[in-house]
Image (tube, rainbow, N blue to C red):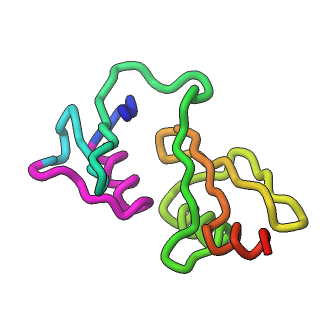
């Protein structure tokens, strides 16, 4: 998946902190392309483009609470990294998601963790 951005290294570094995925070997500040590789070889490629983001993403990532974190704890952690809340769709019954934006304005959703989904199914 390729993500257009103004500063590939900066945005890839942010997503590395958000997801725990490592930066590609040799990626440096100022590079026009920076990669985050996953365990099963899809990867996120951040590419410098001259134009800024102007409309809603047609495709976005979903982030789930992991490492023992709930959806709400994950939202708070990502806010601390510099994300912003775009649309809060959490319900009083604990269902729903939060649409957030990364530092360059790209939307992504934070969904309930696997443990939260399993608990509501029982």
Nearer to me, 103 or 116: 116
Residue 56 belongs to the span the image colors magenta: no
At 70% from the left edge and 67% from the top edge, which residue is drawn? 117
Seen in the picture, residue 100 relative to 2 is either above or below; the reply is below
Provide the major secondary structure of the magenta segment. Answer: helix
Q: Residue at x 27, y 47 (%)?
A: 41
Q: Is residue 10 left or right of residue 73?
A: left
Q: Position of residue 63 (x, y in %)?
A: 54, 55
Would residue 14 be counted in the magenta stretch? yes
Task: Determine the image quadrant of residue 21.
Answer: bottom left
Seen at 68% across and 69% down, the residue is 72
Q: In this picture, is 81 found above or below 89?
A: below
* Image location (x, y in percent) of residue 54: 56, 22
In the displayed orientation, state which residue is furthest to the top: 51
Q: Quadrant of residue 13?
A: bottom left
**Residue 22 x, y percent position in the rendering:** 26, 59
Image position of 111 (left or right of 93): left
Task: Residue 4: give x, y in percent of width and height.
Answer: 38, 29
Instruction: Name the foreground residue: 98 vs 68.
Output: 68
Q: Quadrant of the N terminus?
A: top left
Which span of residues is magenta-colored? 9-26
Q: How many marks?
A: 0
Q: Which residue sits at x=70%, y=53%?
A: 98
Q: Residue furthest front?
A: 122
């Amino acid at each position: 998946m390729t993500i257009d951005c103004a500063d590939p290294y900066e945005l890839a570094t942010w997503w590395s902190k958000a997801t725990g995925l490592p930066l590609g070997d040799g990626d440096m500040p100022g590079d026009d392309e920076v990669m985050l590789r996953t365990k099963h070889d899809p990867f996120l490629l951040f590419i410098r483009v001259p134009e800024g983001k102007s409309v809603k993403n047609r495709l976005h990532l979903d982030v789930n609470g992991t490492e023992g974190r709930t959806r709400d704890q994950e939202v708070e952690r990502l806010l601390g990294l510099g994300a912003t809340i775009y649309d809060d769709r959490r319900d009083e019954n604990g269902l729903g998601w939060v649409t957030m934006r990364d530092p360059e304005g790209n939307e992504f959703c934070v969904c309930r963790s696997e443990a939260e989904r399993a608990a509501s199914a029982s």
